[in-house]
Amino acid sequence: MKIYFGCAMLGGYPNIPIEDLSQFPQLIRSLGCELASDHQTRRGVVEAENKLQPVYIHDRDYSWLLESDAGIFEISNPSLGVGSEISDMIHVGKPVLLLYRQELEDKVSMYIRGKYGSKYVNSPVVCRPYKDMQAAKEHISEFLRIYLKPV
């Protein structure tokens, strides 16, 4: 199973620090998944990405999204790019899991959270708050079990 992981980068980390976000790639791998994208939490990523052309970044990330079986996004920090990636994944019919820190619910976009359960969204979208990494792992495991059953 290949997973597209997404989280804020340029918007900064006002609500959840990069140190916490950096635990997600390894957590997803520990559940037997391959990651199409995991660069967002690496040191120096913003500086490295700033040297690239916008179209290159879009097309690279979009191809990663297309080759992925599903998307897992940490949405506690606001990000226009992550919102676009979520919409793109939904548009191409991929299952999407949205995770955010429980205590930050009032800071997370209600429009994005509203994709879960919307009559206008046809691909599977699950939105879950988590209190710690163990709870996040449980949500990810459940999502994978339900939407990406092993063949």
Image (cartoon, rainbow, N blue to C red):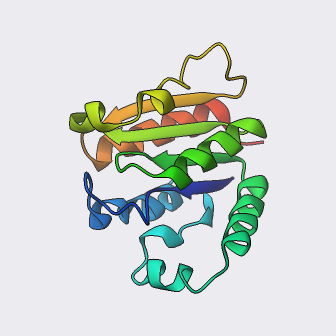
Residue 33, compared with residue 146, is above or below; it is: below
Give the residue displayed 45% in from the left and 52% down from the top.
Answer: 79
Camera sees residue 32: no
Give the residue displayed 35% in from the left and 37% down from the top.
Answer: 108
Going by the image, does 124 lie left or right of 79? Answer: right
Residue projecting furthest to the top: 119
In the image, residue 78 lies at what x, y percent?
39, 49
Give the residue displayed 29% in from the left and 37% down from the top.
Answer: 107
Q: Quadrant of the C terminus?
A: top right
Going by the image, does 149 lie left or right of 23? Answer: right
Residue 67: quarter of image = bottom right
Give 142 or 110, whichever is nearer the viewer: 110
Give the residue displayed 52% in from the left and 85% down from the top.
Answer: 48
In the image, residue 93 lies at what x, y percent?
76, 35
In the image, residue 22 lies at what x, y percent?
37, 66
Residue 78, compared with residue 13, is above or below; it is: above
